[in-house]
Structures are given as C-alpha cells and as structure tokens.
C-alpha cells in the first residue's frame, strides 16, 4: 500500500509541475500555428510571474496579480509581434532578446522595489491562490484505490490547475471548430492564401500573438501566486524551453501537448523524488541527467519513434509581398 | 449600364528599382474573354495583382462598372466581384478542398454551420460547371489540374463576375486545358467577364475576343482577336519579327553517346513509372520524348541524371556504364560530360535565394576557373555571369540580383546558360520552355539546335508536342512508362496523339 501512496504522490506532483508547461505550450501553439515562432515563452512567463508577485504583494489581491501578469505578458507579446510581424525581423532574435531583457529587468526592478534580493514579499491569504477541495474529499479518502485518487490526486489543486486542463479541449475547439482557428491555421501554412482570401495577415497574426500573451500570463501567475508564494528570480528555470520542446514533441496538436507536458512533468516529479534516494541496482542517478531527460527524450523520439514533426509551413518566415 | 466591365487608367507600379507597370491603360468589355500576353517579366501578373488588390498601384485609377473604386486589399476586390486564379496557387496544402474554398468567406464564427452550407453550395457549383472534385480531399494529395479547379471554385464561391486567370494552362495537359476552355466559354455565356493570361498564342486565337499585349512594363497594343494573327501578336510582344518555326538542317548523327538498356524505375510508392525502356542517343542528334505528363518521362530523366535510383537496367555514357541502380554522384556525371536541365527549375535547378551569379556556377563551383585556392573567385564568377547574361539576354542584366526576383523565363535562361555553356557531350533537357515567352522560346530553340550542330547529343523531354516536333530528329513516345513507338518528326500530330493516348498504331489505320 505504501508503494501505491508513493505513486499517487508522484502523480500528484506531476500534475502540479505540468500546469505551467501546459499553459506555456498552449501559448506557443497559438502563435506558432499562426506562423510566428516564439522562443520567448520563457521570458514572458518570467515577466508575468514577476508582475503577478509584485502586484499581488502590493495590492493584496490575487486577482489583481493575475491581471498584471496577463497585461505584462501581452505587452511583451506585442513587442515580439511588432518586431516580427510589422517590422519583419527575425523571430528568433526578437524572442531571445525578450528572454534576456526580462531575466535582467525582473531582478533589477525587484531589488529596487522590494529589496529582498530579487524576490517579491512572501504572499499569504487573499494575495495567493488557494487550493480547491472537491466535495466529500475527506469523507471518501479511506475508500481503497479510488479514495486516494479522488481525494489526493484529483481534488486539492489550485483553480488555475483545473483551468489549464480545461484549456486543452477548449484550445482544440478554437483551433479546429471556429472560423478564427481555421484562419489562424491557414496563416501559418500559407499567408498568401489568407491574404488573397481577403483576410488581413497582419491583424490575424497579432491576434494569435495576443492569445499567446494571455496564456503565458496564466503560466507566470501560476508560478508566483500558486506554486510558490511570491516571485523568486529566474523562477521559470527553463520551463519555457521545455514547453517549446513539448510543443514540437506534440507536433503542434493540443491533446498531444497535454500528454507531452504530463510526461515531462512526470520526469520532473520523478527527479525530485529520486533526489538522495538511490535506485536499486542503478544507484544514485545524477540530478542533471534527470533534468536533461525531457530534451534527450524529445530528440530521441523525434529522431525515430514518432515520425517527422512537420512545423507550420510558413513558420518563422515574415510575410513579405513586395521584395 | 455601360458595356465596359473594367477600365484601368494610368496604372503605374515599381518594386524598388524595377518599374513593373508603366502608365497602363486597359479596357475590358463585359461578357468577353480578354487575353493578355507579354514576355516574361512584362508585368502581366503585377497588373492583375493590382486589380485584385494584392499590390497597391503607385498611381492610377481603377474603374469598375463605371465607378472609380479604390481596391486597397483583396477583400475590396472580392466585394467588387473580382476573383483571381494566381499563377502560383494560393492554397493551404494541408487543408481540405472545402476548407480552402470556404476560407475568408465563412458565414459564421462557428465552423460547423459554415461547413454544411459551403458543402451544399460547392455541390451546386460542381454540377453547374462540371468542376468535380472531392470536397474532403486534401489539397496536397490532388494533382495540379484539380488544384486549379479548387482555385476556380474559390472565385465562383465568392460570386465573382470578373474572373482573372494568370497562366492557367501552364500546368495543364491538353485535355485538361480543353476542359478549362469549355468552362470559360460557359462562364462567358452567363455574362461573366474573363481576363486570361497565357504565353500560348494558339490559345489566345482559340478562345479570346480581344487581346492586349504588354512589353517591358508597357501596354503596347490591344486587338480584336479575329482581326489579328499569331505572327502579328508575336511581333508586338517581342518588338521584332519572331520565327515561330525553328530553322534546322538535316541531322548528322555520329557515335552512340548515351545508351539506355532495359531501364526500370519505381517511384516512392513502389509504382513502376519507367518500364523496361531502351533507346540510343547519338552525337549530333536530338531525340524527343513525347508523352502526356505523368507517363514516366520525368522519372526517366531523373534516373539518367542520377537524381533517382533505378530498379534495374543499364545506362552507358560514352560507352562507359553509369551505375544507375546505386548511388550516382552528379558531379561525376558532369565531369564525364553529361549536363542536365531539370524540369522543375525551382526545386532542382536553382537556389532562389542565391544571386544570379551564384546560380550560374552551381554544381560547377569546384572548377578551378571559379576558385582562388579554397575560396571562391568572385571576380571570375561575376565576369562569367555577365558574359552569360549578355549571350542569353537575361533580364534584368544584373548578376547580383537574387534569383527569386527574376521572372520565370529568365530563371530558365539562367539554368540553360549554366548547363549549355559547359559544352557537354550529352545534354538532357526537361521542359525547356515551360512558362517561357515566344521571344525566349525562339532563342532557346535556336541554342538547342546549335548544340546539335556542334555534334552534341540532346535528349529532350517536353509535354508540348509542337516543341517536340519542331526540334527532334527522332521522336520516342512514352505511355504508362513504356516506349510505345518511335516516329520521324514529320509524323502527323494525330498519329503521335494516338500513340500518346496509348492507342496502338495499327488501330489508327482502321479509324
Ligand atoms: N513581389 C515583387 N517584388 C519585387 N519585384 C517583383 C515582384 N513581383 C514582380 N516583380 C518584378 O516585376 C517585373 C514584372 O513581373 P511580373 O511577375 O508581373 O511579370 P509577368 O509578365 O507576369 O511575367 P511571367 O510571364 O514570367 O509570369 C519583373 O521584373 C519581376 O521581377
Ligand atoms: Mg506572371
């Protein structure tokens, strides 16, 4: 039974660490499907986490924190949009620049405003997201198997966790069942077709980029308002890149994205669990190896097991009509 | 109600230094088919894209049904009843036919309702115009002929009254082109106005009511089709008299340069495309391979030139075997005197992002002439490019321009110059004049015959039967991957046509 509880605990933390990945990967899904590659997910998430932590600390309201996160993240997205859509610059350079600027300025501003070594003040009460407990969670905990699954695995997460998982089918619906989604996918494949069909390529891509900003805002807010109680410098710790790997791994499809993020989250949870606990036969597994595993897995699986991941055809290329 | 559908007044457009349209005036009558012809790069596509709102004119007015309108984007053009089938299709390849037709004209935010409506309307259009195509097929799985249908359906779905077709027949087989012309006739009978761009003067004579000629960005003439002739149009286009028939003396065949024995080639799906083909090619002769597109000619060329592995068979170049069933090094083939002008210049012949001069030496860049030790000798490359530009009249004459910025005909000349100027023993050419204007065709044909007269062996593949007949000393006809006959160039078009259709020569006599 102890083994079972260990499993439940690992799965529970899998869900916890997957949530920001899901938000960020879905964010990437929207822009990349529209043909704007975004290596700046990391920076946007970090900026959002900082804004959320700072505003929640000052106002004492978690909702204000969330709004600030979305606002900052959308602004950063618009910068990326302006550079890569309007000015037709390199999408990679613009994304990398955003990552660097945010990494630096969050530390500087954090130190200037709060003087806690780049942290924002610890949050409590209404300034932080609370967990949601499902009805009868305590009552059924002792039911074998299903009890812990219901009470510990499904119940007791933050509201944003449920939002993230609901966003998966919702994103699928938007992309594949609405006019906006049809056009968005089209503009990522052949902007010329969209343009000659009488739709503005620029405006469509900006809308996609804004969607990305909103979702990255959620990812950042989750980090500093839910998973932790406040912002810590560099707290995204490469999650933006893992989300990008998940996006490629999932071949730019919403449902696959959720599975990929859960897989990467699982590896992460396992790594935490294994720290200091040597495995039978193998012995101590280096932390670094566990942390590199998502990337290694992406490379290996893409190289042979899941076939080619074909990115949106017009991805990364600015739309230029007149040369 | 006037009988004029479109009037363009003083349209002017420049792309950077390229003055693509110079003060263009054009009047198109309602309910007519109006042809537009002109050399490669004359500005035809640009002018039509301005009418469709894809580009903005620098100056000038567009008058539709008597009202001056501003067409600031394709949306405005669509609202004014204009539809356009672009020279390079504007389709989303991994979408279905239905999704492509609907895109931009969906009538609600939620797709399901739009889809069912579009399906009904599409069925109706397909019936009315005999434009059958499976609405649920993916575009990338359709042959080009059907992709073009989708483009036409897109325009009709948006209720276009004025339909612009930019070189629609370039990608069609003769029966497909005939089918298209029937549809255009039907649209005309319904009172729709059609603007039709082509390089094929025969098509102009066959289906248009009026024809306008462009040259180097200017509109030089408009004629009633029945009051003009192919000769006059060709002359107007190029600005000088054009030889529509190539002059050529008798061939003087020498040794066998290329021998193909029992060659069999399969495509990626394992379908046999070339089936046990054998023939000889001698020095000083041109052998033409005729056939409807898709009967194995492309694969034959690819196998001989080392792009595609053959399953079995032998190829001898100058008496020495080429290992066609294993990996062939194209560089080795070049060194042994084989040059290849591929059918698909965009994907195989050129790197569009390179400068003209760079493409001019592609594949020959190991040559000492172009090298300074391990570095490229840019001076020599530049000089070499300028020489070719002059000799082949490549326009604009700028070796530093990106190849993508040359028009199709001029891109073709870049490839031809590169391969022909090396003086190879054997020259293999696929579709030498696809999408190329009459002036350039005359030039290319002359060069091919010159090569022959210098004692080179030329293997020519073309879907243009006229071209095959005009150039070849012997004609080999392919059908379903097999050689179904060999004829002299004076064989009648009917005879060759029957062979190409897979009907045996014997039956021809019976008919
Ligand atoms: N988007 C563009 N940017 C820059 N230059 C362009 C662009 N489109 C066309 N041009 C240039 O404008 C000129 C006219 O080109 P256009 O495509 O209109 O010719 P065309 O008459 O349609 O030729 P073709 O018969 O080869 O299709 C050419 O010199 C071409 O290189
Ligand atoms: Mg054109």
Image (cartoon, coloured by chain):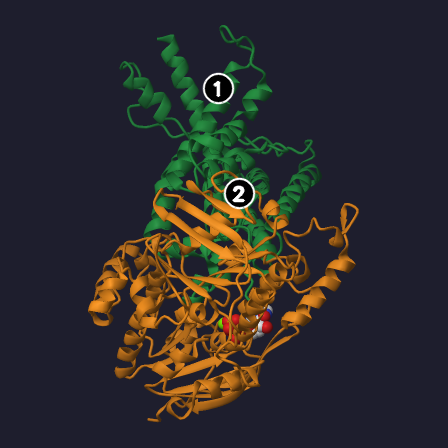
Where is residue B265? Give x, y as percent. 40, 45
Residue B6 can be seen, yes or no: no
Q: How many marks?
A: 2
Task: Please identify the residue farthest to the top as the structure is shown.
Answer: A281
The verdict on label 1 being within 8 Å of ligand 1 is: no
Do discs 1 and 2 share a chain?
A: no
Foreground of the two, B410 or A210: B410
Quadrant hosting residue B98:
bottom left
Q: Which mark is residue B321?
A: 2
Does mark 2's beta carbon lie closer than 8 Å to ligand 1? Answer: no
Q: Residue at x 38, y 30 (%)?
A: A132
CA neighbours of label 2 inside 10 A, class few (<14), some (14 to 19), many (20+) = few
The x and y percentages for residue B172 are: 37, 66
**Quadrant that contains the N terminus of chain B:** bottom left
Label 2 secondary element? strand
Label 1 chain ID = A
Residue B206 x %, y %: 35, 81
Relative horizontal placement of residue B439, taking residue A102 as reference (left or right): left
**Label 1 element class:** helix
Residue found 70% across the figure and 34% down from its top: A115
Say above or below: B192 vs A76: below
- Residue B441: give x, y in percent of width and height: 52, 73
Chain in orange, by letter, is B
**Residue B50 visible somewhere in the drawing:** yes
Q: CA distance from mark 1 to mark 2?
A: 61 Å
State yes or no: discs 1 and 2 in contact (Cβ < 8 Å): no
What numbered label is drawn on residue B84? none
Q: Which residue is mark 1?
A: A270
Q: Foreground: A77 or B473?
A: B473
Residues B229 and A224: in front is B229
- Chain coloured green here: A
């Amino acid at each position: 039974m102890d083994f079972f509880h260990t499993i439940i605990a690992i799965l529970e933390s899998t869900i916890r660490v997957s949530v920001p990945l899901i938000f960020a990967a879905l964010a990437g899904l929207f822009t990349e499907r529209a043909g704007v590659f975004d290596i700046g997910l990391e920076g946007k998430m970090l900026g959002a986490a900082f804004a959320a932590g700072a505003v929640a600390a000052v106002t004492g309201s978690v909702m204000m924190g969330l709004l600030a996160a979305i606002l900052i993240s959308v602004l950063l997205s618009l910068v990326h949009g302006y550079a890569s859509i309007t000015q037709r610059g390199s999408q990679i350079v613009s994304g990398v620049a955003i990552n660097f600027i945010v990494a630096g300025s969050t530390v500087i501003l954090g130190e200037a405003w709060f003087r806690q070594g780049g942290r924002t003040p610890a949050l409590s009460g209404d300034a932080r997201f609370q967990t949601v407990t499902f009805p009868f969670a305590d009552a059924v905990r002792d039911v074998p198997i299903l009890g812990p699954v219901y009470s510990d695995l499904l119940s007791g997460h933050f509201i944003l966790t449920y939002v993230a998982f609901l966003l998966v089918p919702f994103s699928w619906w938007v992309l594949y069942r609405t006019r906006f989604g049809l056009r968005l996918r089209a503009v990522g494949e052949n902007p010329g077709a969209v343009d000659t069909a009488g739709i503005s390529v620029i405006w469509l891509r900006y809308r996609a980029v804004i969607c990305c900003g909103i979702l990255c805002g959620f990812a950042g807010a989750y980090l500093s308002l839910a998973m932790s109680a406040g912002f810590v410098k560099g707290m995204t710790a490469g999650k933006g890149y893992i989300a990008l790997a998940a996006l490629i791994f999932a071949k730019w499809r919403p449902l696959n994205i959720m599975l990929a993020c859960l897989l990467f989250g699982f590896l992460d949870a396992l790594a935490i669990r294994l720290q200091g606990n040597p495995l039978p036969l193998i012995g101590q597994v280096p932390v670094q190896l566990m942390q590199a595993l998502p990337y290694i897995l992406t490379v290996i699986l893409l190289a042979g097991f899941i076939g080619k991941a074909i990115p949106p055809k017009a991805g990364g290329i600015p739309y230029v009509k007149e040369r | 109600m006037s009988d004029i559908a479109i009037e363009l007044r003083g349209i002017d457009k420049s792309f950077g230094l390229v003055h693509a349209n110079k003060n263009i005036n054009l009047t198109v009558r309602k309910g007519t088919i109006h042809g537009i012809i002109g050399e490669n790069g004359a500005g035809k596509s640009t002018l039509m894209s301005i009418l469709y709102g894809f580009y903005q004119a620098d100056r000038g007015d567009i008058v539709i049904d008597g009202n001056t309108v501003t067409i600031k984007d394709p949306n405005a053009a669509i609202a004014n009843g204009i539809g356009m089938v672009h020279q390079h299709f504007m389709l989303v390849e991994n979408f279905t036919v239905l999704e492509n037709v609907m895109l931009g004209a969906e009538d609600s935010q939620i797709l399901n309702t739009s889809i069912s409506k579009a399906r009904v309307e599409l069925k109706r259009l397909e019936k009315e115009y005999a434009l059958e195509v499976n609405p649920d097929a993916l575009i990338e799985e359709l042959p080009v002929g059907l992709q073009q249908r989708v483009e036409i359906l897109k325009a009709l779905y948006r209720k276009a009254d004025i339909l612009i077709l930019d070189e629609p027949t370039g990608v069609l087989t003769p029966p497909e082109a005939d089918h298209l012309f029937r549809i255009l006739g039907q649209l005309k009978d319904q009172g729709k106005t059609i603007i039709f761009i082509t390089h094929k003067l025969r098509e102009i004579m066959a289906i248009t009511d009026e024809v306008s000629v462009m040259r180097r960005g200017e509109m030089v003439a408009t004629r009633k089709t029945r009051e003009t002739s192919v000769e006059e149009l060709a002359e107007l286009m190029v600005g000088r008299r054009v030889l529509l028939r190539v002059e050529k003396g008798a061939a003087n065949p020498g040794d066998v340069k290329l021998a193909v024995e029992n060659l069999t080639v399969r495509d990626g799906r394992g379908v046999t495309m070339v089936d046990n083909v054998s023939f000889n090619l001698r020095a000083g002769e041109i052998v033409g391979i005729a056939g409807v597109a898709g009967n194995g000619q492309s694969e034959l060329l690819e196998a001989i030139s080392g792009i595609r592995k053959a399953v079995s068979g032998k190829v001898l170049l100058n008496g020495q075997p080429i290992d066609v069933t294993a990996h062939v090094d194209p560089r080795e083939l070049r060194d042994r005197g084989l040059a290849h002008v591929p059918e698909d210049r965009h994907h195989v012949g050129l790197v569009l992002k390179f400068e003209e001069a760079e493409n001019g030496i592609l594949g020959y860049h190991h040559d000492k002439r172009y090298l300074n030790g391990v570095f490229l000798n840019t001076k020599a490359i530049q000089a070499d490019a300028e020489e070719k530009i002059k000799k082949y009249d490549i326009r604009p004459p700028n070796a530093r321009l990106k190849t993508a910025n040359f028009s199709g005909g001029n891109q073709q000349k870049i490839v031809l110059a590169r391969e022909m100027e090396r003086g190879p023993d054997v020259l293999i050419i696929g579709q030498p004049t696809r999408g190329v204007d009459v002036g350039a065709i005359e030039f290319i044909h002359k060069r091919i015959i010159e090569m022959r007269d210098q004692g080179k062996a030329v293997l020519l593949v073309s879907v243009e039967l006229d071209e095959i007949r005009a150039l070849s000393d012997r004609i080999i006809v392919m059908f379903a991957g097999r050689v179904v006959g060999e004829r002299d160039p004076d064989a009648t078009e009917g005879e060759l046509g029957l062979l190409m259709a897979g009907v045996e020569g014997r039956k021809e006599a019976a008919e």
